[in-house]
Amino acid sequence: MALSKIPNNMQTPLALTTSDMPTGSVLQVVSNQNISSGWIGTSSTSMVSSGITQSITAKRTGSKLRVNFHAPMAHATQGHIRIGLSRNDIGQRGTAYSFGYQNKDQNSYQPMIIDFVDTQTVTKDVTYTYTITFLSEQGYTTYLVHNSSGYYLHVTEIAG
């Protein structure tokens, strides 16, 4: 159909606000990625920050936040590595083994992956920061990210 035959009110770009979007719609995606990070390691037996963080400012109250993390090559020459996820306002998410565990005797160089939908309430215009945490169960140096490897951390806001 020729543009001249389309009514003027249908030619203007549609301007939806976040409040117009139906439940389940993606409202925004923010990312932190590094394709050649260098070693990120610890020998701590308590959860510590990896330095990998991503903040998101909610556009709509009641949304869900989906967190995707991938480190393709975690490494432990001795002992075991465990990863976790923390949110600035409520702390550590999940249980001790919710997000990932590597036993160096059985699966060294295993990818560490988190795909988590955080159903805790979010409020419009509040900034939430997710941090990837990790520990070495026996106190040996373990690496969440292997030298010359990388990682990504994406946070997606989904309309609730």
Image (spheres, grey):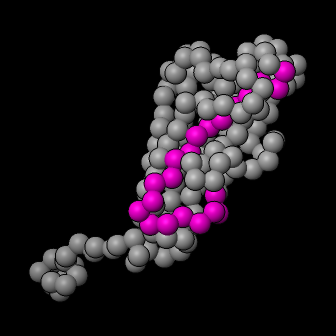
Q: Quadrant of residue 114?
A: top right
Q: How many marks?
A: 0
Residue beneath the point at 28% across and 74% down? 14
Q: Quadrant of the C terminus?
A: bottom right
Q: Quadrant of the N terminus?
A: bottom left
Magenta residues span: 118-138
Residue 113 horizontal/vertical position (percent): 68, 39
Residue 152 lies, with reference to residue 106, above or below; the image says below
Residue beneath the point at 60% across and 49% down? 87
Q: Nearer the viewer, residue 15 or 50?
A: 50
Residue 58 horizontal/vertical position (percent): 45, 61
Residue beneath the point at 71% across and 33% down? 47
Q: Is residue 96 left or right of residue 10?
A: right
Q: Is residue 118 left or right of residue 75?
A: left
Q: Nearer the viewer, residue 94 or 14?
A: 94
Residue 79 lies, with reference to residue 70, above or below; the image says above
Q: Is residue 104 left or right of residue 116?
A: right
